[in-house]
Image (tube, helix red, strand yellow):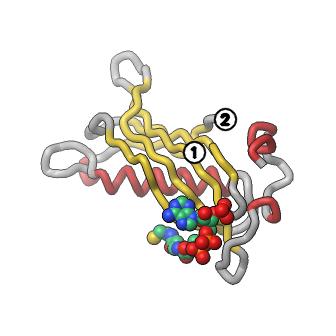
Amino acid sequence: MKQISLRGRAYPSDLNHSGTVFGGWIMAKMDKAASIAVEDIVNSGAVTISVTDLHFLKPIRNGDIVTIYTEIIKVGNTSIQINVNVMVRCKQSHEEYSVTNAIFTFVTLNEDRKPINVRDVIRDDINDYVKELL
Ligand SMILES: CC(C)(COP(=O)(O)OP(=O)(O)OC[C@H]1O[C@@H](n2cnc3c(N)ncnc32)[C@H](O)[C@@H]1OP(=O)(O)O)[C@@H](O)C(=O)NCCC(=O)NCCS
């Protein structure tokens, strides 16, 4: 189930010399959005272990409003995969179009920062969609 994990606007300090947003700016925001999606379903710490299938589809420009959607797509033993999709709202029509997407994998950690089984730290209030992935 897709949800909004982060929203914001691109400002001049976020732009490269060509006038579009730095890739690293949006990657950092995607990582934060994915971490929020993970925190929504577990009550332990978690860290990013990999990012795959990262695609910059369209540029983000000064003033663009950016919405980052996340969707938990797989729960392993100690890992959680999240599909992260960044959308920009068209200023005229207000329709959203996709600008960047990637798959993030997080590992849930115990207090000693060792991987811990996701099912041992899953929150009680997860929705039915996530329950089906367990
Ligand atoms: C996260 C960390 C504690 C995992 O330790 P580890 O001993 O490598 O863990 P494991 O080999 O048991 O793997 C843990 C899980 O990650 C998965 N995994 C390992 N490498 C992976 C990779 N390259 N891509 C995707 N998943 C991966 C494993 O399949 C396993 O998942 P599962 O339990 O659901 O099957 C350790 O790698 C670490 O601290 N990495 C740095 C994390 C970090 O600082 N991130 C911030 C970015 S700067």
Quarter residue 130 falls in: top right
Ligand 1 under 8 Å from disc 2 Cβ: no
| Spot occupied by residue 65 in the image (x, y as percentages of width and height) | 40, 36
On the rendering, which quadrant does ligand 1 occupy? bottom right
Q: Can residue 15 be seen in this view?
A: yes
- Give the residue pinned by disc 2: 1
Q: Is mark 1 on a helix, strand or loop?
A: strand
- Give the residue pinned by disc 1: 5
Q: Can residue 48 be seen in this view?
A: no
Residue drawn at (60%, 41%), measured in percent from left and top?
Answer: 71
Residue drawn at (63%, 43%), measured in percent from left and top?
Answer: 73
Q: Residues within 10 Å of mark 1 (few under 14, many from 20)?
A: many
Q: What element carries label 2?
A: loop
Residue sitting at the far top:
93
Q: Residue 45 carries which label?
A: none
Image position of 118 (left or right of 6): right
Position of 96 relative to 33 (above/below) = above
Q: What residue type is labelled 1?
A: Ser
